[in-house]
Amino acid sequence: MKERLNEYINENLKAIPRIKRRLSNYQTSKVDDYINESNKESHFQELLFKYIDDRALKDSDVYNKVHIDRRLFSKIRSDINYHPSKETVILLGLSLKLNEDEIDKLLNSASYSLPKNNIYDLIIRFCFIEGIYELKDVNDLLETYNCKLFS
């Protein structure tokens, strides 16, 4: 089974460059331009530290408020390739007291969102809309609806 999977992957990976070669230079150029433009959007770390600076907060103010480990926060600050969990992004948003638009932007910069089709995400979105930033209060709301709590 594993052998068949490897064969399948190798066959399909070989097909990818052929597809690109079949595209006209114009089409390829448009795709490349789109990718380059999209990569100019704020990366998670840039946006996070912009929010921290805008609020004139110290790093320790941010990570201590929501019980994020100092070493994890240091990794977020120093490793450009670090990809946070959705939970970490939400916790940072709570600590920074972001509004709904700001948390959406921060989540989006890390490739996450708060869709309006499940209870957990609706509760989290509600907290940002209503300015409910205390972890205990957020957890109380999550517990009321039998959702996973923040630790």
Image (cartoon, rainbow, N blue to C red):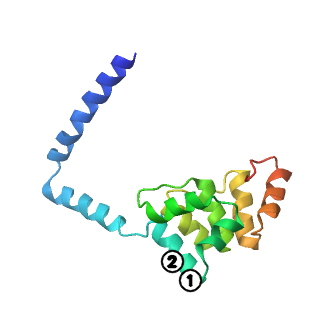
The answer to whether 149 is drawn above or below residue 104 in the figure is: above
Sort mark 2 into few (<14), some (14-19) or many (20+) by Cα contacts within 10 Å.
Answer: few
Question: Is label 1 in a helix, a strand or a loop?
Answer: helix
Amino acid beneath label 2:
Lys
Displayed quadrant of residue 59: bottom right
Q: Which residue is painted at 59% across and 54% down in the image?
A: 86
Quarter of the figure that contains the N terminus: top left
Left or right: 106 as drawn, with respect to 96: left
Residue located beneath label 2 in the image: 50
Left or right: 118 as drawn, with respect to 109: right
Q: Label 2 to label 1, Cα distance in Å?
A: 6 Å
Residue located beneath label 1 in the image: 54
Regarding residue 148, the answer to whether it shows in the image is yes
**Residue located farthest toward the front when viewing the structure as drawn:** 71
Query: Residue 85: x and y, percent?
Result: 57, 53
Q: Which residue is painted at 62% across and 65% down in the image?
A: 92
Amino acid beneath label 1:
Asp
Query: Residue 91: x and y, percent?
Result: 66, 62
Displayed quadrant of residue 54: bottom right
Question: Is label 2 in a helix, a strand or a loop?
Answer: helix
The answer to whether 91 is drawn above or below residue 10 in the figure is: below
Circles 2 and 1: CB atoms closer than 8 Å: yes
Sort mark 1 into few (<14), some (14-19) or many (20+) by Cα contacts within 10 Å.
Answer: few
Query: Residue 133: x and y, percent?
Result: 74, 69
Left or right: 77 as drawn, with respect to 124: left
